[in-house]
Image: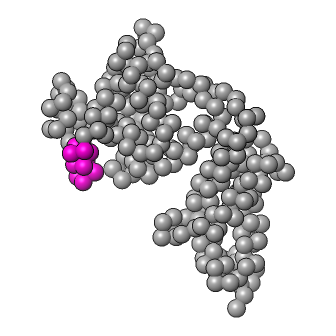
Amino acid sequence: MQTTMSECLSLEPEELIDRLRDGESEIREYLIKTYWDYIRSIVSRMTGRKADSTDEFSVALEAFNEAIDDFDIAKNPSFLSFAGLVINRRVIDYFRRNKKYGVEYPFSSLSGDDRDDGYEPAGFHPPLLLTERFEIQDEILSFKQSLMAFGISFDDLILSAPKHTDSRAMCAAVAKKLHEDRRLSAKLNEDGRLPIAGLLAGFSLSRKTLEKNRKYIIALYLILQSDMEILKGYIESYIKGANAG
């Protein structure tokens, strides 16, 4: 029995995809038409201009189709969130293949600095290509999910971030140690708590200092042990720059 237009209006996209897979092929066209503006808004945000009749929009439409085919509610309960990620990735791939997007933008959002001695870790604020800006957006979505597993929100991270460069460098060094020591990282992943006793043995730090910076250290560790290569590169270059300073 075919789904009527009025029934489509009352169904969530996840339910519509189920019916599509049951053989109601016309639902694909309905989904594309219904979420046309949603697709366009993502591309407009990524390019900074209207998305109609652009190559990027064509790429996004293909990505939306891909998302319909690949959606698995067991892994991604929200189809629109999943589709948004697929669209972002495919448009980023398009950016990579086209040199016209090799425009540089300054990267300054990962670190604020209140030191007045002019010190800045080598390589920590290089310019970013436009493609990298959107790769970071994609990485941040994954990062948020990783933080949630430890009960940490982005707001928590902002509030707990050390104000001084040397304190941030210290946290990065602790996170690197945590990442490299399988015993300590296994304990963190198992308990969900920072293995303070084990870390104290490797650093001349107080328990109070580690506890105060717990959320920030865990956040840096999550980046280092992930495949978020851009954010990971900034942390590693930051540690090198701080050590050289």
Residue at (56, 27) in percent of width and height: 107
Residue at (29, 38) in percent of width and height: 180
Residue 117: x percent and y percent? 42, 8
Residue 93 vs residue 14, the one in the foreground? 93
Whether residue 11 is visible here, answered yes or no, is no
239 sits left or right of 71 in the view = left
Residue most toward the bottom? 1
Residue at (31, 35) in percent of width and height: 175
Stretch of the chain drawn in magenta: 182-194
Task: Tell me if residue 51 comes above or below residue 197 in the rendering.
Answer: below
Residue 141: x percent and y percent? 51, 48
Residue 128: x percent and y percent? 60, 29
Residue most toward the top? 117
10 sits left or right of 151 in the view = right
Whether residue 160 is in magenta: the answer is no
Instruction: Name which quarter of the figure residue 2 lies in.
Output: bottom right
Quadrant (top left/top right/bottom left/bottom right) for the C terminus:
top left
Q: Main secondary structure of the magenta part?
A: helix
Residue at (76, 34) in percent of width and height: 100
Whether residue 183 is in magenta: the answer is yes
Quadrant (top left/top right/bottom left/bottom right) for the N terminus:
bottom right
Residue 92: x percent and y percent? 65, 45
112 sits left or right of 81 in the view = left
Whether residue 31 is visible here, answered yes or no, is yes
Instruction: Name which quarter of the figure residue 127 lies in.
Output: top right
82 sits left or right of 201 in the view = right
Task: Tell me if residue 7 comes above or below residue 175 in the rendering.
Answer: below
